[in-house]
Amino acid sequence: MRARVTSADLAKIAALLATAAIMLLANGLQGTLVPVRANAEGFSATAIAFMGSAYFVGFLAGCLLIPRLIERVGQIRTFAVLGAATAAIVLAHALIVDPLAWGVMRAGIGLCAAGMFVVLEGWLNQQAGNAIRGRIFTLYAALNNLALLSGQYLFTLGDPRGHELFSFAAILTMCCIMPVGLTRQAEPPRTGVARLRIKRLYRLSPVGVVGAVAVGLVSGAFWTLAPVYAESRGMTGDGVALFMAAVILGGALAQWPLGRLSDFTDRRIIIGAATAAGVCAGLMLALPAPFAVAPELWLLLGGLAYGATVFPIGSLTNAHLNDHARQEEMTEFASSNLFVYGTFAAIGPMVAAGVIAVGGMSAIFFYTASVHAAFLVFVVYRMLVRASLKQADREPFEPEPLQPAAPLHLAEAAAKD
């Protein structure tokens, strides 16, 4: 039986959780604001996709480079510098409205976000004892998802064509430095950088690796272009935020039940079922609303269904990977899987932009449905050629943040070494 999380345990991590929540509020606001503002400025779908790809290129660079910076100057200095840089870059969006410049800025935001979460999650991992680590990270994931959802509400508080929302996001980013800067908790030890072992990872868990490919291709495109898609279907302002909130809410509500169900059967069955349902949800969003259903209601229902089916796939495939990894390999495998995800998340927006150029903005969900259909075929094939693990050999499922903005899995895995 797991140990309970006491008030003393929460006191140790309160500053870290507060920092994460404020930062995710800012990230959630930025994630919707930037593509909507870019669309209002007349940026092409290809230009907006380029910005999304640039974010994930920066994200990958942050995962590889920031641990080395932490080794040199420590956790708090690294976090403060990256937070200040993020705020400055966010404000620059309102001053320099140019597709190429915004692409460079989004790469910078991705690098800083990954680095800030490397600090937060590594520190959180150090503060959480082995007996309560699972519960702490479940709480952390729930808080992250709630902050991401709340960030959509912040989008409704100003005009995306002005500078106020960029200023608000920058203010939140600067505020998130305060709890960590003032904490009395000791910094965690400075650790080295894990090796990438992708070939070994694929031999160990093909579904886990191909799942990271599929999730990267789809989520990179979704987070970049979904707000523009909502606008193209007639939603503006509050409607865009409501659509994004519906998707996030669906994912947050469905992740834990699907994960717990997968603990008691072959996880690939649940992965396949979620993927098949994700194909249907994608087609629902790609096609016009039936005659008797209001278009706005159809989009919200489709968004809720999409989030509930597609978003849990990443956490399910990561759990399947953990089932096959030895304790001493988990850090390297988590880092490798994260690298696979980030690489294909950078590719996804550009592929989706090509599909959109041919079929229109709604074709983004024909693209996601196609990726999920291909992954479903692979999952079924693997179930035919490889037997399921025994239940006793499976790790318990733990919920994860819906928007992988940094190496959470690396932080969790390091705890198990």
Image (cartoon, rainbow, N blue to C red):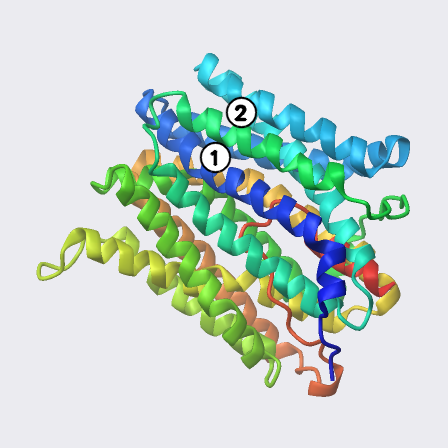
Residue 66 on image: x %, y %: 78, 35
Residue 85 on image: x %, y %: 65, 24
Q: Secondary structure at mark 2?
A: helix
* 104 to 197, vertically: above or below: above
Residue 320 on image: x %, y %: 66, 70
Quarter of the image where the C terminus is located: bottom right
State the image quarter where residue 65 is shown.
top right
Residue at horizontal 20 percent and vertical 40 percent from the top: 234
- Give the spatial CA distance, label 1 vs label 2: 8 Å
* 347 sits to left or right of 135: left
Query: Which three-letter amino acid code belongs to the residue tagged 1?
Result: Gln
Q: Which residue is mark 1?
A: 30
Is there any visible trace of residue 200 in the rendered image?
Answer: no
Q: Secondary structure at mark 1?
A: helix
* 203 to 385, vertically: above or below: above
**Residues at circles 1 and 2 in contact by the CB criterion of under 8 Å:** yes
Residue at horizontal 14 percent and vertical 55 percent from the top: 294
Residue at horizontal 57 percent and vertical 42 percent from the top: 22
* 78 to 1, vertically: above or below: above
* 6 sits to left or right of 299: right
| Residue placed furthest toward the top | 96
* 60 sits to left or right of 188: left
Query: Of 102 and 70, which appears nearest the observer?
Result: 70
Could you tell which of marks 1 and 2 lies nearer the N-terminus? 1
State the image quarter where residue 214 is shown.
bottom right
Query: Of 341 and 15, which appears nearest the observer?
Result: 15
* 69 to 284, vertically: above or below: above
Residue at horizontal 90 percent and vertical 31 percent from the top: 72
Q: Which residue is mark 2?
A: 90
Circle 1 crowding by C-alpha within 10 Å: few under 14, some 14–19, many from 20: many
Residue 156 on image: x %, y %: 33, 38
